């Protein structure tokens, strides 16, 4: 009668199998880490992408123009510098970036507004004629605030405006040939208290972003695909 002899695997074989499983686990883990790293890099690249954006209205090219800003009385009292700030900075950007654009100096526009208190009741074509320009960029700032309504302890800047263009040399000089709405916020997160930022910093950030986006309407530009604000 044959006798069955049970043999135990040698210690070297056990070690080899164990080491093999460790290597396989390490490779799998490493593959997972590599995939995660590649994914993170891909997301970072995507977030960093830029867009080449054409002008929404390119009719300022090779024409004379003026930028005029309107705001309600409450805004003028609480933020007396905002009209002049927006007027000057939008005008500077248009003059610098729009091919062949001749922009009336903002000081002349502001002086004319001051000397002509009834200007809001005038037809747009007549305003352009008074200023001696072919194009009128009209920014109606219907909302401008630095705090939430009824809460002076937090910062929540908002600048909202209807922006339009009239062509004084066109068939309908008193009608807008282009209109758009722009609402800009700063900062881009909620709950920022007065202890975290100064009033002038909030105002500077809000005006800077508003002027940038208002000006972009009139010329080709590069912007973030996924803006932070």
Image: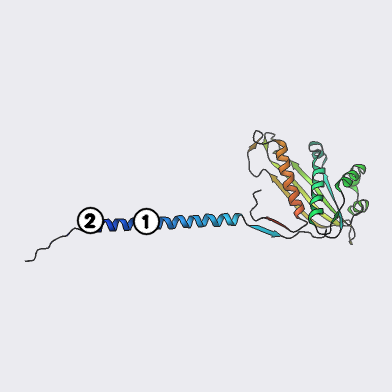
**Which residue is at the front of the view, 46 or 173?**
46
The local secondary structure at tag 2 comes to helix
Q: In the rendered picture of this protein, how many numbered marks are placed on residues?
A: 2
Crowding around mark 2 (Cα neighbors within 10 Å: few <14, some 14 to 19, many 20+) is few
Crowding around mark 1 (Cα neighbors within 10 Å: few <14, some 14 to 19, many 20+) is few
Q: How is the image coloured?
A: rainbow
> Is there any visible trace of residue 166 in the rendered image?
yes
Is 14 on the left-hand or right-hand side of 103?
Answer: left
In the rendered image, the quadrant that contains the N terminus is bottom left
Q: Residue at x 58, y 56 (%)?
A: 45
Residue 178 screen position, x and y as percent? 80, 58
Is 185 on the left-hand or right-hand side of 7?
Answer: right
The local secondary structure at tag 1 comes to helix
Residue 136 screen position, x and y as percent? 86, 54
Is 3 on the left-hand or right-hand side of 228?
Answer: left
Q: In whole angstroms, how far apart are the C-alphas of marks 1 and 2?
A: 21 Å
Residue 171 placement: quadrant: bottom right
Q: Which residue is label 2 attached to?
A: 11
Q: Residue at x 73, y 51 (%)?
A: 213
Is 112 on the left-hand or right-hand side of 25?
Answer: right
Q: Residue at x 21, y 58 (%)?
A: 10
Residue that lies at the very extreme toward the front in this rendered image: 12
Residue 19 placement: quadrant: bottom left
- Which label lies toward us, 1 or 2? 2
> Is there any visible trace of residue 175 in the rendered image?
no
Q: Which residue is label 1 attached to?
A: 25
Q: Residue at x 90, y 53 (%)?
A: 128
Which circle's residue, 1 or 2, is located before the other in the chain?
2
Residue 118 circle label: none
The answer to whether mark 1 and mark 2 are in CB contact below 8 A is no
**Which residue is at the front of the view, 80 or 37?**
37
Residue 134 placement: quadrant: bottom right
């Amino acid at each position: 009668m044959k006798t069955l002899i049970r043999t135990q695997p040698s210690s070297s074989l056990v070690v080899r199998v164990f080491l093999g499983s460790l290597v396989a686990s390490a490779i799998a883990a490493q593959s997972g880490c590599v995939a995660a790293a590649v994914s993170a890099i891909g997301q970072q690249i995507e977030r960093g992408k830029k867009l080449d954006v054409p002008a929404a209205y390119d009719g300022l090219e090779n024409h004379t123009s003026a930028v005029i800003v309107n705001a309600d009385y409450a805004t003028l009292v609480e933020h007396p510098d905002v009209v002049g700030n927006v007027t000057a900075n939008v005008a500077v950007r248009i003059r610098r970036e729009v091919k062949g654009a001749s922009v009336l100096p903002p000081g002349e526009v502001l002086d004319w507004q001051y000397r002509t208190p009834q200007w809001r009741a005038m037809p747009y074509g007549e305003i352009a004629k008074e200023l001696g320009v072919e194009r009128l960029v009209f920014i109606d700032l219907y909302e401008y605030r630095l705090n939430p309504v009824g809460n002076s302890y937090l910062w929540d800047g908002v600048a909202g405006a209807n922006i339009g263009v009239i062509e004084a040399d066109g068939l309908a000089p008193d009608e807008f040939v282009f209109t758009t709405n722009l609402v800009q916020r700063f900062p881009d997160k909620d709950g920022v208290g007065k202890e975290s930022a100064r009033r002038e910093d909030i105002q500077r950030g809000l005006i800077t972003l508003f002027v940038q986006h208002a000006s972009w309407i009139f010329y080709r530009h590069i912007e973030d695909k996924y803006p932070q604000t």
